[in-house]
Amino acid sequence: MERTSGVGRIASIDLERWRSPIRLGLSAVGVVVLAVFYSVPGPGFDFFAYWAVDPQDPYRITDGLGAFHYAPPLIWLAEPFKLLPFDVGYVVWTVLMVALLLWMTRSWALAWCAFPPVASELYHGNIDLLLAVVLVAGFRAPGAWVLLPITKVTTGLNLLWPVLRRDVRALAIVAVVGLAIGSASLAVQGIDTWRAWIEHLGLRLGRPEAGGALIDFSVWLRLPLAIGVMVGASVTERRWLVPVAVVLAMPLLGVHSLAALVAIQPLWRSTAAEIDMPSPRAARLGP
């Protein structure tokens, strides 16, 4: 037993010795990758859709620059940015996304930018880092998970976690929050806006997924894989697998969509902490 503990300690020491050099090296690469992205004119392609969305006719543009694909309540989140000039709004949005990245990855934030999808996410101003934060936060505050299906519908697959684990409390919270948001939206924005969103999604079904920054891998092929990963995550209690399933379930899988995998790091930490922490019963009984 003592030998095993000694080997474990040596492995831990070796890992700690290399952790800082690896982080610094990846951070240097991250700076270069960011510089490459931002050397190209025209950042904020995706952010433009949030900034330019017309609350009276949000789904008028079906594809391309300015196309808004999210459920009506998300228009409210976009409203504050519409009060700012585009360049200022994009900077504010980027600062917020960097803050979320720091919250999830701490000192590894710049190292994660060596992963091109993260740098691409910041450059284009998409919403995937926000979804990663929502995914992480939902394990403590399940109501946050409502944001997933009303942004990218099929990412609501993550709700299989409480379903498979029979977490009635989490499901009840999600249901109450979802009903509250939906009711408020119907009362203020009207049913016609919701109908327009559903029609908008219908128009996008069946369109080819190749081209631009999209990965040619149909969601209908990815969903069974995502369900399998979710089942495995639930059975083995590996929270960090949930972001993998959510990315696989994205309606359109873009390169920047992979930025949501950042959620693996904080969920890995939380899983490891729970494994290392003895249960209350074990603590009372002792070794």
Image (spheres, rainbow, N blue to C red):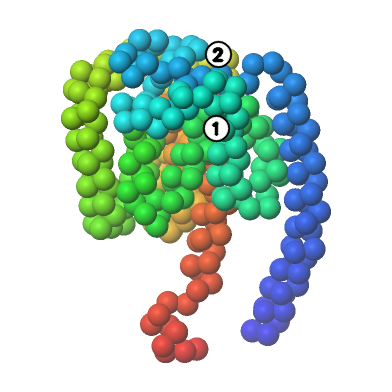
Q: Earlier in the sequence, mark 2 or mark 1?
A: 1
- Dividing the picture into quadrants, the one containing residue 141 is bottom left
* Three-letter amino acid code at the position of disc 2: Gly
Residue at the image position 40 percent from the left and 80 percent from the top: 280
- Dividing the picture into quadrants, the one containing residue 187 is top left
Local crowd size for mark 2, using a 10 Å CA cut-off: few (<14), some (14–19), many (≥20) = few
* Residue 112 rendering spot, x and y as whole percentages: 66, 42
Q: Is residue 208 above or below residue 222?
A: above
Residue at the image position 24 percent from the left and 25 percent from the top: 189
Q: Which residue is labeled 2 in the image?
A: 211
* Residue 6 rendering spot, x and y as whole percentages: 72, 79
Q: Split into 4 quadrants, where in the image is the N terminus?
A: bottom right
Q: Which residue is labeled 1 in the image?
A: 93
Task: State the SS at label 1.
Answer: helix
Q: Is residue 144 above or below residue 97?
A: below
Q: Is residue 10 left or right of residue 81?
A: right
